[in-house]
Image: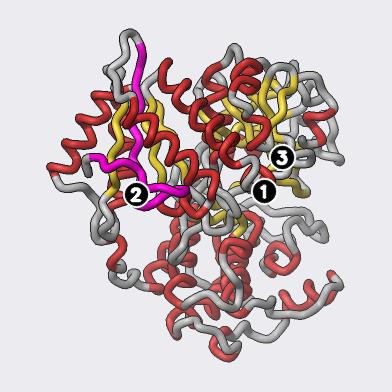
Amino acid sequence: MTQLASRTSSPTLDDRFLLVEAIGRGGHGRVYRAYDRVERREVAIKVVPRDPDDPTRPPSEGEFAAWIRLRHPNVVRAYELGYARTGPLPRGSAYLVLELVRGVPVHRALAPGRIPGAVLEEVARRALRALDHVHRASLVHRDLKPGNVLVTPSRRGCGRLKLTDFGLASQTGQASEPGRVSGSLPYLSPESILGEALDGRADLYGLGILLYFLASGRLPLSARAPEHWLRWHLDGPPVDLARAGTPASPRLSAVVSRLTSRDRDARYPTAAEALSALGPAGPPGPASASASLPAGERAALRFAIDAARRGERRALRCPARPGAERAVRHELQAATAALDVSLARIARQPAARYANLDRVVLRLLLERGRGVEALVARHHLHRGLPLSLLGGVPVWDRLDRDEGAARGPGTLPVVARGVAEFLLDASRRRALAVLVERSALSDPLAASVTDYLARAIAVSPGPREGAAGLLLVSPDVTCGRSRRPRTPST
């Protein structure tokens, strides 16, 4: 359980946001994953401390005013600004409600020094697109560093990239007080050190240093003393990626050299021009060739969703061809949103040890609202998931739960049955589509839950009077000790 949750009787903030777990901590505040009961979505809550130089000044208004104007696929969305009235935060604490990104800092998502050249270029392109949008809004981010560039895990290449944390953002043309340095030292531009008026070229300098770090696995200066870094930024040798023995292409090396010029007039005037100099990406790989389902498979999927809305239980096999799983996922997301069907996606990210059953169960519990305690007890959910109840609200308790123990031979059947029966129970109130991705089946618990659901569907397909139904979409593979019953393919 997070330290914050253990100090309070309820993790509900302002009777709306259920704080679930701490996911970040830095110099500009803590970040928590939370569930928004009004919008019925998971969000990130960033708690911002007050300015020590001006404690009377509301701490987040400037940051929020800058952030709320930004709407771009490569920039984390800011939804609203609040001040705590009730709940676990001290009264009056300012917090930002942000888009929840299931990603990690770029230097943890990728392996600096071992990143393929094509992936490095894609990181540069997406970061430049984000900066172009920020700069067109007359803003300077002022804190480009690995921790503020989030990347979602991906088995191949670069996942989604999002620029975050606008706590130091300022209007273009604004100057800081000379001698007062704000930001991370290795990524500071010379003009920010000198207290000059800043524009987007300060962010381009920081991005150039970041790209050098990702390509080479080290910073261009091996020093810890602040004065050494300040001197290096002002009059150090040029940054030369071409001589660092990296997989970076000649054109990326040339772009980084120009981005990191000490003379800002020698840098690219805008992020758009830097993006143009980098050139277009190469052709997509074969895995992305299939972006949509053939008409017959799309119709079968839509019919199955409609049957679940009528109270039936259906199971479909996902085609095994490349790109089909992604196409099925996109079709399911669109169809379930349009038809008011709940969607549970069971998957395992590359960096994760287990599948995301905990997140799936938590979201369904939160949607249920009342009677959560009875559900947890009836289905023994606390035995298999890092789950505790605090004030009647489910929260994570990873300190006192051994997730590996739930997958042992003695407990796996009981835990799998409990989770599967909970999913069946949830589908009786609102039609539920469960998409099991191939990656999840490497987790024995997810595989056993899938097997149990398939057997339950084969035994009792429905329809059931006055109840919703369930659709299970999963790969045609063996789960547990036996093969699931044959079901019509999508």
Residue 487 occupies which quadrant of the picture?
top left
| Amino acid identity at mark 2 | Pro
Residue 14 image point, x, y percent? 68, 17
Mark 1–mark 3 Cα distance, whole angstroms, equals 22 Å
Residue shown at the point (28%, 67%) measured from the top left: 286
| SS category of the residue bearing label 2 | strand
The range drawn in magenta is 467-487
What residue does disc 1 label? 404
Report crowding for label 3: few under 14, some 14 to 19, many 20 or more residues within 10 A (C-alpha).
many
Few, some or many residues within 10 Å of mark 2 (<14, 14–19, 20+) = many
Towards the viewer: 255 or 231: 255
- Examine the rendered structure and indicate whether residue 394 appears above or below residue 30: above
Residue, disc 2: 475
Which comes before the other along the chain, label 1 or label 3? 3
Compared with residue 470, is residue 177 higher up or lower down, i.e. above or below?
A: below
Which quadrant, please, contains the C terminus?
A: top left
The residue that appears at 31% across and 26% down in the rendered structure is 313
- List the residue tagged with mark 3: 22
Dot 1: element = helix
